[in-house]
Image (cartoon, rainbow, N blue to C red):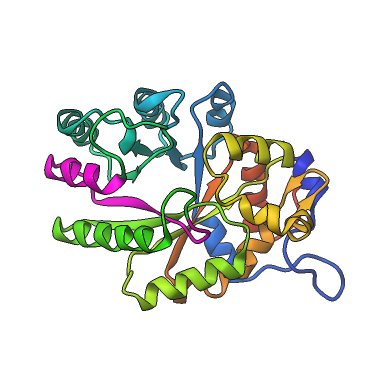
Amino acid sequence: MISTVRKIWPFATAAVDGSPTFSTAMGELVANLHYEIVPMKSIEQAIDDLPTGAHVSVTCSPAKGISATLEYTDRLIGRGHRPIPHLAARMVEGADEAAKLAGWLRERELPEVYVIAGDAPEPAGPYDGALAFLRDFLAADPGVQRVGVAGYPDGHAMIPDDVVTEQLHLKQALLAEHGLGGWISTQMCFDTDRIAWWLDHERAAGIALPVRLGVPGVVDRTRLMKMGTRLGIGTSLRYLGKNRSTVMQMMAPGGFDPTDMVVAFAEEAERLGVEALHSFTFNAVADTRAWQEAIMSGGAPA
């Protein structure tokens, strides 16, 4: 578990004597980390490696479908975690299924759910994107307190930027109409300047929802590239193709080190409305957890 973390240490900016330094803001941001796990074979080990009472997002993959997301959400509830199921609109067959999903959440009294269009190549029903599904889903009263939606600092491969922006504003308005809170989970992007610009731009345009900043976990570079492409985040990996040398500097021999990305936003988190980190672990939970614990303790892992 510690091997990858040892390889990429030290985390954060070095002090004059060469030892790692940490800010209070960085510790607070890292402490509020949400682990994203993926329904596939490696999820069993990922679940075992989660810290006690973890916030856990369960993705909705085209290969496994919504049923797998719900199954793992139930398992996580049983183990005392705080799961956030992802519902992919393009996998929902219609209003009747949307109502059933709302009922499923209501029965379990889950406080949060995340709604995204999803990566299915063809919609299973009438929902081409998240907004139309969200309307029917909320009308069926899922009983949640907050709903997460996606933000795309690096743009979307299939949708023009102005449409993505319009949809985000409409989702925010819809949540307000239903008296619900929400948040924006940013899709993976390596360009910290681009993320900061996007956040400032959207705030100026009226987006007030808090943000959970999407960052890769401590992930082997091969797994990051392979699974990232498979799981539909190739759009944000465009930055890697254009700025390979920059991203490779973030990659130590053992894998990706998210520290520099966290450092870039820690002091500005409150101003930018960043409430938490959303860690794309690609099921490499053990190393990501070790990184989190090391940052929070203010010292290198033992």
Q: Is residue 84 left or right of residue 289?
A: left
Numbered range of the magenta stretch = 130-155
Most extreme residue toward the right is 17
- Please say if 108 is above or below 36: above
- Please say if 131 is above or below 296: above
Let me know if residue 282 appears in the view. no
Magenta span includes 138: yes
- Please say if 4 is above or below 41: below
Badge count: 0
Residues 15 and 284: in front is 284
Q: Residue at x 43, y 74 (%)?
A: 201
Image coordinates of residue 167 in percent, x first then y, are 30, 57
Image coordinates of residue 142 in percent, x first then y, are 19, 40
Q: Residue at x 84, y 76 (%)?
A: 16
Magenta span includes 190: no
Image coordinates of residue 251 in percent, x first then y, are 76, 51
Q: Is residue 98 left or right of residue 152?
A: left
Residues 178 and 242: in front is 242
Q: Residue at x 20, y 28 (%)?
A: 97
Let me know if residue 235 appears in the view. yes
Image coordinates of residue 57 in percent, x first then y, are 44, 41
